[in-house]
């Protein structure tokens, strides 16, 4: 059973004031991925933008789950960004996004990518989790909220 702590590091969680656009948000996430996981931010941005061009990853209710397969990682890694001020993400429900969980997966076809996507999706579909995430801005608290939920569900 996959847990959030398998794919998310505490330093990959942050709260940011705002992003001026979806593109700027993806750039910021890519830079954060480089800082935390040592990947090339340009390549991450390219992979995320290519995935977005296939269809938005804005899943609704203020949540987006941008994800891409990427040659710079050998296991699935996640980044969580909480925005103080929501940004337009071309979401299916037309609502701006303030909770963004990004997944980067290895190029190799691996069912873990889908498991991670399902885990993140299940977690962020929980209304009470999203409320807690929106109510807190401390990265350590956000990390705890995200990882505790999956740990209790797995138990």
Image (cartoon, helix red, strand yellow):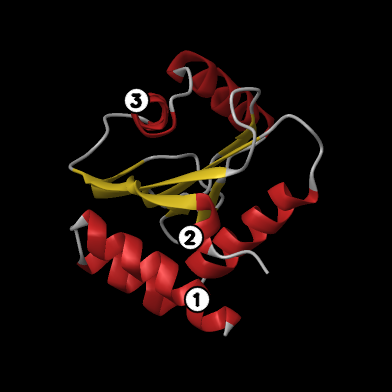
Residue placed under numbered mark 1 in the picture? 151
Decide if residue 87 is on the left or right side of residue 60: left
Q: CA distance from mark 3 to mark 1?
A: 33 Å
- Residue to which mark 3 is pinned: 24
- Sequence-wise, the earlier of marks 2 and 1 is 2
Tell me which numbered mark, 3 or 1, is placed earlier along the sequence: 3
* Viewer-side residue, 64 vs 120: 120
C-alpha span from label 2 to label 1: 8 Å
Outermost residue to the top: 42
For the residue carrying disc 1, how many other residues have a C-alpha within 10 Å: few (<14), some (14-19), or many (20+)? few
The x and y percentages for residue 69 are 67, 32
Give left or right: position of 70 versus 22: right
Q: Label 2, secondary structure: give it.
A: helix
Numbered mark located on residue 5 in the image: 2
Q: For the C terminus, which image quadrant? A: bottom right
CB within 8 Å, label 2 to label 1: yes
């Amino acid at each position: 059973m996959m847990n959030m702590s398998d794919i998310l590091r505490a330093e990959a969680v942050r709260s940011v004031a705002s992003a001026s656009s979806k593109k700027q948000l993806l750039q910021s996430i890519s830079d954060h991925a480089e800082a935390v996981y040592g990947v090339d931010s340009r390549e991450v941005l390219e992979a995320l933008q290519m995935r977005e061009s296939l269809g938005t990853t804005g899943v609704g209710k203020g949540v987006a789950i941008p994800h891409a397969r990427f040659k710079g990682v050998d296991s699935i890694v996640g980044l969580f960004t909480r925005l103080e001020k929501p940004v337009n993400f071309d979401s299916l429900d037309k609502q701006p996004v303030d909770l963004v969980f990004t997944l980067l997966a290895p190029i190799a076809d691996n069912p873990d990518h889908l498991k991670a996507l399902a885990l993140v999706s299940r977690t962020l579909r929980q209304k009470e989790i999203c409320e807690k995430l929106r109510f807190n801005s401390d990265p350590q608290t956000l990390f705890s909220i995200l990882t505790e939920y999956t740990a209790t569900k797995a138990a």
